[in-house]
Each structure stands twice: as structure tokens, then as C-alpha cells.
Image (spheres, rainbow, N blue to C red):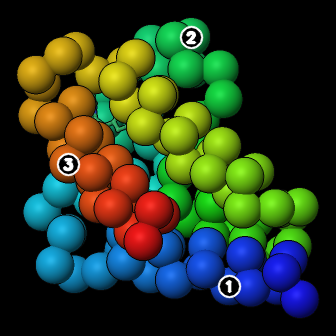
Amino acid sequence: KKYAAELKFCQTVLKELTSKKYESFSFPFLQPVDPVALNCPSYFKVIKKPMDISTIQNKLNTNQYESGAEFEEDIRLMFRNCYKFNPDASPVNIMGHRLEAVFDKKWEE
Ligand SMILES: Cc1ccc(Nc2c(-c3ccc(O)cc3)nc3c(C)cccn23)cc1
């Protein structure tokens, strides 16, 4: 069915984003931001809806997405959070743009 094929493609896209070849710029996005570990106490004041790839993977595995569009919403939320918290041209901001470029290419494949 279309629905199953759509969600299967989401799995393929996540596999691409977490591939070792991108680990030099995907690592800030693989796990939830830990404001204590990263020493960024303002994080939860600035970012109201945290999102990361491991959370998206879990939602996909537990059928919490109704469609590919909902999956894409969480991916885009993750990158918006990154651009909001990390100043333009900062290392993690640039990593976000690089990983989003990988997503864009695979998503429109
Ligand atoms: C004081 C300070 C300033 C910036 C950061 N950014 C940051 C983020 C981050 C990722 C996504 C996101 O939505 C927000 C932040 N991930 C990291 C990592 C893995 C290492 C170093 C910095 N990192 C951390 C602490």
C-alpha cells in the first residue's frame, strides 16, 4: 500500500542520514541535545520542541507517523531548532545545513 511504501522510504532516508560517511557533521543530531553535557542551560528556554534523529527513529519504529509529511515535519523541526539555537555560520549551524542538504537530496530522490 502507498502508506507502507511511504514509511518504508522514511526508514531509508534515516539510514542515509545516520550513515558513517556523514558522521563528521551528523553527530549533533543523532541524540537529544543534553543541555547539561553541552553546558547550554538556556536550551529548553529557547527550544520548546526538541527533536533529534533517535527520537524520529523511535517514532517511526512505533508507528507514531501517519504519513511521510509528518515524518518530514519532525526532520525540519530538528533543523529549525539547530538554526535557532546555533548562531549563523557557527560550526553546529553549518553542520545542520550540510546534513539538511543530504536530507533534501534523498527526500526528493
Ligand atoms: C554553549 C553551546 C552552544 C551551542 C551548542 N550547540 C551544540 C549542539 C546543538 C545541536 C542541535 C541543536 O538544536 C542545538 C544545539 N550540539 C552540540 C554538540 C554535539 C557539541 C557541541 C555543541 N553543540 C552547544 C552548547
Q: Earlier in the sequence, mark 3 or mark 2?
A: 2
Q: Quadrant of ligand 1?
A: top left
The answer to whether any part of residue 27 appears in the image is no
Q: Nearer the viewer, mark 1 or mark 2?
A: 1
Q: Nearer the viewer, mark 3 or mark 2?
A: 3
> Dot 2 lies on which element?
helix
Q: Which residue is mark 2?
A: 45
C-alpha distance separating marks 1 and 2: 35 Å
Q: Residue at x 89, y 89 (%)?
A: 1
C-alpha distance separating marks 1 and 3: 24 Å
- Above-or-below relation of 15 to 14: below
Q: Position of residue 102 (x, y in %)?
A: 29, 60
Q: Is residue 92 left or right of residue 84?
A: left
The image quadrant that residue 87 belongs to is top left
Q: Which residue is mark 3?
A: 98
- Above-or-below relation of 97 to 85: below
The image quadrant that residue 41 belongs to is top left
Residue 109: mark: none
> Dot 3 lies on which element?
helix
Q: Position of residue 51 (x, y in %)?
A: 58, 43
Q: Which residue is mark 1?
A: 8
Amino acid type, callout 3: Arg
Q: Residue at x 47, y 20 (%)?
A: 43
Q: Residues within 10 Å of mark 3 (few under 14, many from 20)?
A: some
Amino acid type, callout 1: Lys
Relative to the observer, which residue lies in front, 6 or 27?
A: 6
Amino acid type, callout 2: Lys
Q: Is residue 45 left or right of residue 23?
A: right
Q: Residue at x 73, y 77 (%)?
A: 7
